Image (spheres, rainbow, N blue to C red):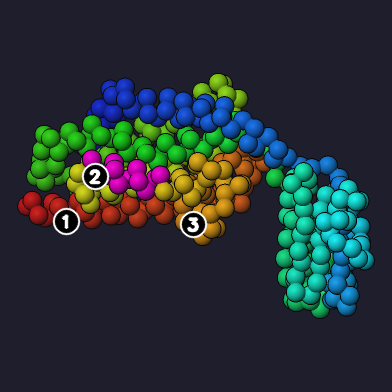
Amino acid sequence: MIRYLIKNNFKLMARNWVNMFMLVLCPLLVSAVLISAFSSLLATYEKTDSFMAGYSIEEGSAWAKAEETMIAAGSEAGINLIRFSGGDPETNIRESDLGGFVAISDSGYKIYRTEDQKAQGMTLEYFFTVFFDQAAAAASGVNISTDAISLSVEHPEFVKAVDSCDYYGIAYPIYFSWCGIICAYALLSGEKKYGIGKRFVVSNLTDTQITLSKFIPSSVFVFLGIAIACVLSAFLFGVHWGNVFLIGSILAVMIPAAIALGLAFYSISDNIIITIISLFGLVWTMGFFGGTFETYMFSSHPKILKLLSPIYHCNRAIIEISSSGKSDYYLSALLYCGAIVIVCLFVSIMAGKIRRRGRA
């Protein structure tokens, strides 16, 4: 019986051309507009060549013990560090044509940079952030051992270039995936209109089977539509999707999470219009903090707000996999979306049980 429902529900969604428009054409159209509008936004996101930077260390500072290690690590990172014993940092940058300047003291460090050397200044800031964080962790304070630091300090690989084509060509299929419940509009509204839910009350189907009869075809249909959009984006815009297996596994968990979330909203409200409005509001908020509209590389939102958004985890994981072949957010994206599937399906099933008892 449940297989019959799954097959019929899938056919019902496939008959509606609006569904295919939303899943395939909408992501492509929005991506095309943003790729064109922001083609120069990420053009400078690339590794800088070797450059000189100045630094000064406060007299008597314990950080002086790590000076040799700092210079060696900087050289490996393409930063030639030159010590200055005095003078104004901004004057030193101008007169010596430096990419930036770092003033180091026991209380911390301050980085000076100019607008015309912005990329070099950002590289310098990133390097010293990593260096001092790892140096402090290795030395457990400012009582620094050069040997201890040399064993633990590594300069991370610079993030590979990501242009607007790859970024927005990936971010918007992900974003529209989270709105996938709208593809089940005809299915859910039809059940309400023709009183099919009341017929389920007297059937032998359990609430779990009823929920799965909507969840499974909706997830498969949305996955196929988004997969088509991804393939077309590669041909039309040249989007690099990277490791197909890793990205496919994220989509295979993320899309069911989106459908389960929509079904949970519907099971609580029992109204498809309220469901769509509420879900779209939540998805917009998750996209706002998750890097859909403003790239997560340049976003100034607090980190905690980004991490609360499943879209952020999925965006970072897929975009980094496409550019670097791996991502630290791959596992978190899978676990986060997997948790959403379990929790939301449980909510849907329990809401169905409560509603069935009310009708019995």
Look at label 3 and name its amino acid. Answer: Leu
Locate the N terminus and report the quarter of the image it occupies: top left
**Residues tagged 3 and 2 counted as in contact (Cβ below 8 A):** no
The residue tagged 1 is 354
For this rendering, which residue is in front, 331 or 98? 98
Above or below, 102 against 322 in this view is below
What percent of the width, then of the height, locates residue 170? 53, 35
- Mark positioned earlier in the residue sequence (3 or 2): 2
Residue displayed at 15% across by 52% down: 355
Disc 2 versus disc 1: nearer the observer: 2
Mark 3 vs mark 2, CA separation in Å:
25 Å
- Asked if the magenta segment contains residue 276, the reply would be yes
Report, in whole angstroms, how far the alpha carbon at label 2 lies from the one at label 1.
20 Å
Q: Which residue is mark 3?
A: 305
Q: Position of residue 193 (x, y in %)?
A: 12, 35
Q: Tell me if residue 71 can be seen.
A: yes
Q: Is residue 135 above or below residue 281?
A: below
Query: Which residue is depicted at the point 76% across and 66% down?
Result: 109
Q: Is residue 302 left or right of residue 191?
A: right
Look at mark 2 in the image and give the residue it sits on.
274
Question: Magenta residues, as a range?
Answer: 273-284
- Mark 2: few/some/many CA within 10 Å (<14, 14-19, 20+): few
Residue type beneath disc 2: Ile
Q: Is residue 344 magenta?
A: no
Does residue 44 appear to the left or right of 33 in the view shown? right
Q: Which residue occupies 42% across, 36% down?
A: 176
Say whether residue 334 is visible: no
Q: Earlier in the sequence, mark 1 or mark 3?
A: 3
